[in-house]
Image: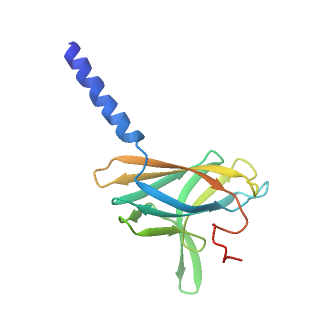
């Protein structure tokens, strides 16, 4: 009986530690747009580089009821925004979540998002084996994005 319990505990510990692993991905230049009180949504942007094949499958933040990965695309002469259920990341290739393209859409905001503050954002990933991982970020809120001095 004790062996069975030990074996079960070991399996549970392995499963929990596999879920709790940080994502094998690097994040650069993360930023989020400010949102005034009453504004229902804002966007978050970041450049991701994975060290192994991964799929970005979700996002969450305590400042929003809903966080989704969205994509802006031209359809004819109209720019449309749609939810992107997942985004593939190839090892060593940068995937840019940016205005006018892929981005994290934070909706049903619970608070004003002020410039000069930082907001927690969690990105969820799945690897080729189906194991999940997450990347915890503290995203600076600013009017214009990133750390690029050439942006105006």
**Along the viewing direction, whichever of 150 and 121 lies nearer the viewer:** 150
- The residue sitting at the right extreme is 37
Is residue 51 found left or right of 28 in the rendered image?
A: left
User: Which color scheme is applied?
Assistant: rainbow
Q: Quadrant of residue 3?
A: top left
Q: Quadrant of residue 101?
A: bottom right
Q: Is residue 138 above or below residue 51?
A: above
**Along the viewing direction, whichever of 132 and 52 lies nearer the viewer:** 52
Q: Position of residue 75 (x, y in %)?
A: 52, 82
Q: Position of residue 139 (x, y in %)?
A: 62, 55
Give the residue displayed 38% in from the left and 66% down from the top: 92
Q: Position of residue 35 (x, y in %)?
A: 74, 59
- The residue sitting at the top extreme is 1
- The residue sitting at the bottom extreme is 77
Q: Quadrant of the N terminus?
A: top left
**Along the viewing direction, whichever of 101 and 94 lies nearer the viewer:** 94
Is residue 88 found left or right of 71 in the rendered image?
A: left
Give the residue displayed 39% in from the left and 64% down from the top: 88
**Number of numbered discs overlaid on the protein picture:** 0
Give the residue displayed 62% in from the left and 56% down from the top: 106
Q: Quadrant of the C terminus?
A: bottom right
Q: Is residue 102 above or below residue 115?
A: below
Q: Quadrant of residue 36?
A: bottom right
């Amino acid at each position: 009986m004790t062996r069975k319990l030990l074996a079960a505990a070991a399996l549970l510990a392995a499963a929990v530690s596999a879920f709790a692993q940080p994502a094998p991905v690097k994040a650069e230049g993360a930023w989020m747009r400010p949102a005034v009180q009453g504004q229902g949504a804002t966007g978050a942007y970041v450049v991701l580089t994975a060290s192994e094949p991964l799929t970005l499958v979700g996002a969450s933040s305590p400042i929003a009821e809903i966080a989704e990965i969205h994509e802006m695309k031209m359809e004819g002469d109209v720019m449309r925004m749609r939810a992107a259920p997942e985004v593939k990341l190839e090892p060593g290739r940068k995937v840019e979540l940016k205005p006018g393209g892929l981005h994290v859409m934070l909706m049903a905001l619970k608070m004003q998002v002020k410039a000069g503050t930082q907001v927690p954002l969690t990105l969820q990933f799945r690897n080729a084996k189906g194991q999940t991982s997450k990347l915890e970020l503290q995203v600076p809120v600013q009017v214009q994005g990133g750390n690029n001095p050439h942006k105006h």
